Amino acid sequence: MAHWRIKLSLLLNYFVFAILLNSVGTVILQVQNNYSVSESAASILEAFKDLSIAIVSFIVASYITRIGYKRSMLGALGLVAVACLLMPQVPAFWTTKLLFAATGAGFALIKVSVFATIGLVTNDSNEHASFMNFLESFFMIGVLSGYFLFSAFVDDINLKSTSWLTVYYVLAGIALAAFLLLLSTSIDESSVQHEATKGIMDDLSDMLRLAITPVVLVFVITAFVYVLMEQGIMSWLPTFNSKILKLPTSLSIQMASILAASTAAGRFLAGVLLSRISWYWLLMICLVVSAGLVLLALPLAASVDGSNVTGWGNAPVAAFVFPLIGLFIAPIYPAINSAILSSLPLRQHGPMAGLIVIFSALGGTTGSIITGRVFEIYGGQTAFYFSLVPIGLLLILITLFSRMQRKTGQQVKQVSGMAGH
């Protein structure tokens, strides 16, 4: 089996969806310009993306081996290719909603299938971890590429121009290339085809039983609040750059890439630091610095008029400072996910993964909608000051979760030790 072709296909699949999923902030800005949509109405795009991910992830988790990993990925790529082609052909707000619903559903199929396929094409745990990290790094490359790809098609002179929709022909082409590469690649799924899978009601029952466990309940609230904050910032940063800092539209989109880059750097640095420092204290430090950064950056933005800005060279300092929050909030999500999974028995990792996906999706939708409404009613400054509320909540929730997680982890080790004897 040509593993290099499969790995290349998985990377390309992730690349396509990284661009589409993280284009929501750019598209929120553009639909306001093109379709005269209000901030609160535009924020609903996050719900179409995230709720599709949550619902489809939950459903396919039970039946993915019956459908087949390759067939699931081909279906996802075909779905988004068609949705991308529809965008410039039928320029309307409803087609944008349809695109993000298709992207969310497709990503759910891709994520479950890709994660499962990695086990088929790696030989040991070290190779598995190595490729998983490379895959996540490639995802961030896709996120960064998306900002520059979209900004290349934006018309800064005529804000009502729909020329930016041409980018979807490019994205449809990438999705089609990924589809053809995967179609021509053989994947041996025989080792998992014989495994029986539980029905959806069994999975739901497992998740509900797990969700009412005190430590898991605190965890899902923590994850929800974190993603609420992160997605609120990420989805509305291009609009903040455009409407508050008065930057040109294309530059507003490009400079939002600083957030993605700082998030990637933050997760890499956290991977190094976590071998030397407790995850709890690292997150506490990161949250305090994040709050300080909000209080430093937003006053800098208050008196900025970037209407005469022509590029990165003469952009205001505030456009560089605020996105650096990604460097400090980046370690939170992977750290708490790792903490909860490592404190639970292996048999509960599947239901826990389902809860992580569902509550993360709900948090992302809620964050974008709340930020959009505050942005519309009170302005962008207040909307981003609002991030101090979830930061404060996270300081409390992570402290509580850390104490409960340590006790749960000790109980699991005791049970494992007894089982070993």
Image: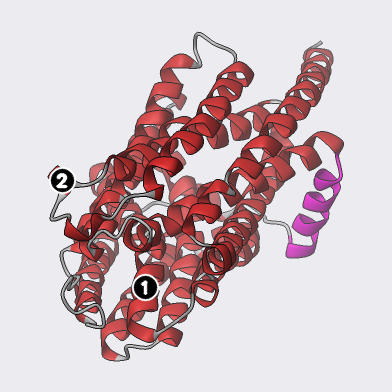
Q: Residue at x 33, y 42 (%)?
A: 318
- Count residues near mark 1 (Cα–Cα under 10 Å), then give few for <14, some for 14-19, many for 20+: many
The picture quadrant where one finds residue 348 is top right
Q: Disc 2 on helix, strand or loop?
A: helix
Task: From the top left corner, tell me how far across and down residue 135 is, in percent.
Answer: 35, 41
Q: Which residues are magenta?
A: 199-213
Q: How was the colour assigned to the protein in this rendering?
A: secondary structure
Amino acid on which disc 2 is placed? Asn
Task: From the top left corner, tell me how far across and down residue 226 is, in percent.
Answer: 60, 43
Q: Disc 1 on helix, strand or loop?
A: helix
Which of these two is toward me, 298 or 126? 298
Compared to residue 27, the image places residue 335 above or below, namely above
Residue identified by numbered label 2 = 314
Query: Magenta-highlighted stretch: main secondary structure?
Result: helix
Assign the C terminus to one quadrant of the image: top right
Taking the image as shown, residue 292 lies to the left or right of residue 128, namely right
Amino acid on which disc 1 is placed? Val
